[in-house]
Image (cartoon, helix red, strand yellow):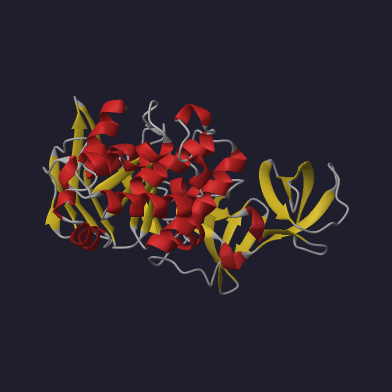
Amino acid sequence: MTDMANTIDAAAVPGASAGAASDAAALTHPANVAVRNLTIRLGANTVIENLDLDVLAGEFVVLLGPSGCGKSTLLHSIAGLIDVSDGSIEIAGEDMTWADPKDRRIALVFQSYALYPTMSVERNLSFALRINGTPKAEIARRVARASEMLQLGPLLKRKPSQLSGGQRQRVAIGRAIVREADVFLFDEPLSNLDAKLRTELRRELKQLHHSLGATMIYVTHDQVEAMTLATRMAVMRGGVIQQFGTPAEVYARPNNLFVATFLGSPAMNLLKGTLETRDGALHFCSGNARIDVSAYEFTQAPAHGVPCVLGVRAEDVHITAGASERAKVSLIEPMGNHRVIWLDYHGEQIASIDQTKAPIAEDDSVAFSFDAAHVSLFDEASGARL
């Protein structure tokens, strides 16, 4: 990791000694990133194959997926830390596929902070600028700006060992900010922090993006980070982007069963059944359940009797007196401002997010309904959205 940090530090500010004014003007403009037909092989293992990704200038794009899906490999290839086997990577319209990291005008924030333990916070922040010969006045301006943004002023004389985990990560982020790079890359920067610190720094990162207007690409396996930070998010699995869109789009209209179940807590409820036309309307039928899906926006005309899977989010399962379905309450999970009520529905466990204070106890029999306007339908064989 130290070698990687040195590589990225050396990449901080190409041409900095040419003068502060021209340097700042050249490095404060966000850049687009275009990945084309990217293939990466590590030994005999193909990690990514024929991947395309377009990140617009000024976007905050999150690469989301489980461990081993290729998201960090993709980020490191953009940074120039991993050689590609095929395809191309463009930054600001310039082919950077084989460019050295120092020539890519990027800044990378690591999961493990990668701070220099013998240097003060101030010298950690300024290190890359100093080795590139940036004028002292410009270094002072950039360090002061980053310190103000991240509230590091009182910590400038401390060593990393005297800082908390959250403070260390702020310094790591500050070290990226002083570079005034075209693209900022974040490799799971909050995963080592506790829940409270993650929430605080997540908010600060979003505010930082608004302040800088910079292009940011962020890797995480945490869906909450992805949903709250992203302008657009790419959900990955097995080196393939399963869906790329705004958090609202991906959450409401998942492309396939993997995306549907990976996002959401609790995970999307799933019921297997068939599509049948009854009384002039199209219904999803599963055991005793019968849901009118006539208004559903199909990607193509559905076939009668086709086996499919209906997905419905927990917040779209409503426990309401007089509703058409009935189930037994198997478990109640209090969550503060709401509770998750698990229903035993003909042997299937259905989650409902309930924000009422209605008296409900385990083993109660309750009436509930599915919100047909917000269901998703998937082909049972392929898992693709219908």
Measuring from the top left, give residue 274's x and y in whole percent: 52, 55
Rendering quarter of residue 189: top left
Question: Which of the two residues, 201 or 77, is positioned nearer the viewer here?
Answer: 201
- Residue at the image position 38 percent from the left and 61 percent from the top: 212
- Residue at the image position 38 percent from the left and 66 percent from the top: 300
- When the figure is inspected, residue 119 is found, relative to residue 367, above or below; the finding is above
- Residue at the image position 57 percent from the left and 49 percent from the top: 268
Q: How many marks?
A: 0
- When the figure is inspected, residue 356 is found, relative to residue 5, above or below; the finding is below
Measuring from the top left, give residue 344's x and y in whole percent: 73, 43
Specify the farthest residue to the right. 359
- When the figure is inspected, residue 189 is found, relative to residue 314, above or below; the finding is above
Specify the farthest residue to the bottom. 280
Measuring from the top left, give residue 182's x and y in whole percent: 26, 55
Question: Which of the two residues, 264 or 269, is positioned nearer the viewer here?
Answer: 264
Q: Give left or right: position of 328 versus 202.
A: right
Rendering quarter of residue 292: bottom right
Q: Looking at the image, can residue 386 be seen?
A: no
Quadrant of the drawing holding the C terminus: bottom left
Question: Which of the two residues, 168 or 119, is positioned nearer the viewer here?
Answer: 119
Quadrant of the drawing holding the N terminus: top left
Q: Give left or right: position of 144 versus 15.
A: right
Question: Which of the two residues, 299 or 243, is positioned nearer the viewer here?
Answer: 243
- When the figure is inspected, residue 202 is found, relative to residue 123, above or below; the finding is below
Measuring from the top left, give residue 58's x and y in whole percent: 33, 62
Rendering quarter of residue 26: bottom left
Q: Looking at the image, can residue 209 be seen?
A: yes
Q: Give left or right: position of 213 versus 249.
A: left
Specify the farthest residue to the front. 137
